[in-house]
Image (tube, helix red, strand yellow):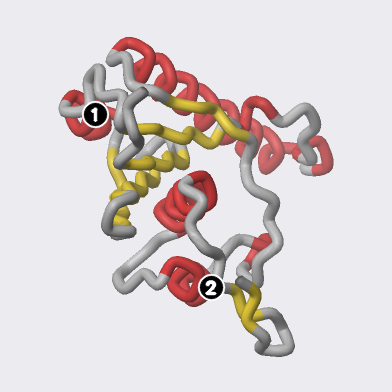
């Protein structure tokens, strides 16, 4: 059995998906926003590589959505965007299968952060992952997905400023 050396998290998006690469030997994380075409080129170098595990956020696995509460053209736009993102995620999984790269589809992480829509903020992400650099919502989501699935330590300060390890 091959020992894992990289965990890659992907937050699928139609325009640019968030991609996070964690080197399990050094603990170093790199974040990227890639188009589907750029992702295809990026993953070519991992073809048949059993030391890599890719974690894909699979929103299509969620059994119940709350988008039915949005009516009219706004609701249609939200539904269209969600459907396109789900399709992009399924395309990514199909690409990984064609390249014979080990991967798992996982449910989206629970939103329990301080950002808008309870999404993780830049500050929270950098604190948890000791990351220094720029982020956007897609790269933070991919990074958190990779971090948790790589069994990296979560250093979180709660509202009372106590550290949880």
In the displayed structure, does residue 106 sit left or right of residue 20?
right
In the displayed structure, does residue 84 sit left or right of residue 130?
right
Of helix, strand and loop, which one carries label 2? helix
> x, y percentage for residue 137?
47, 57
In the displayed structure, does residue 66 sit left or right of residue 48?
right
For the residue pair 72 and 143, the one nearer the viewer reads as 143
User: Which numbered tag is attached to residue 124?
Assistant: 2
For the residue pair 126 and 15, the one nearer the viewer reads as 126
| Residue 105 visible in this rendered orientation of the protein | yes
Q: Would you place residue 152 above or below residue 34 in this image?
A: below
Identify the residue shown where x is 36% and y is 23%.
1
> x, y percentage for residue 33?
31, 48
User: Which numbered tag is attached to residue 43?
Assistant: 1
Q: CA distance from mark 2 to mark 1?
A: 29 Å
Q: How many marks?
A: 2
| Residue 71 visible in this rendered orientation of the protein | no
Where on the picture, by quarter, is residue 41?
Answer: top left
How crowded pointer 1 is (Cα within 10 Å; few <14, some 14-19, many 20+) is rated as some
């Amino acid at each position: 059995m091959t020992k894992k050396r990289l965990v890659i998290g992907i937050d699928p998006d139609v325009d640019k998906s968030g991609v996070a690469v964690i080197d399990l030997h050094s603990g170093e994380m790199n974040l990227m926003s890639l188009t589907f075409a750029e992702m295809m080129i990026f993953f070519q170098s991992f073809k048949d590589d059993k030391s890599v595990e890719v974690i894909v956020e699979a929103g299509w696995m969620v059994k119940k959505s709350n988008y039915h509460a949005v009516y009219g053209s706004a609701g249609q736009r939200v539904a269209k965007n969600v459907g396109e993102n789900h399709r992009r995620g399924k395309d990514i999984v199909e690409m990984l299968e064609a390249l014979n790269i080990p991967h798992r589809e996982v449910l989206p992480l629970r939103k329990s952060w301080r950002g808008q829509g309870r999404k993780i903020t830049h500050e929270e992400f950098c604190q948890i992952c000791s990351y220094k650099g720029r982020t956007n919502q897609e790269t933070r989501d991919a990074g958190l997905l990779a971090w948790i699935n790589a069994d990296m330590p979560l250093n979180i300060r709660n509202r009372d400023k106590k550290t949880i390890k």
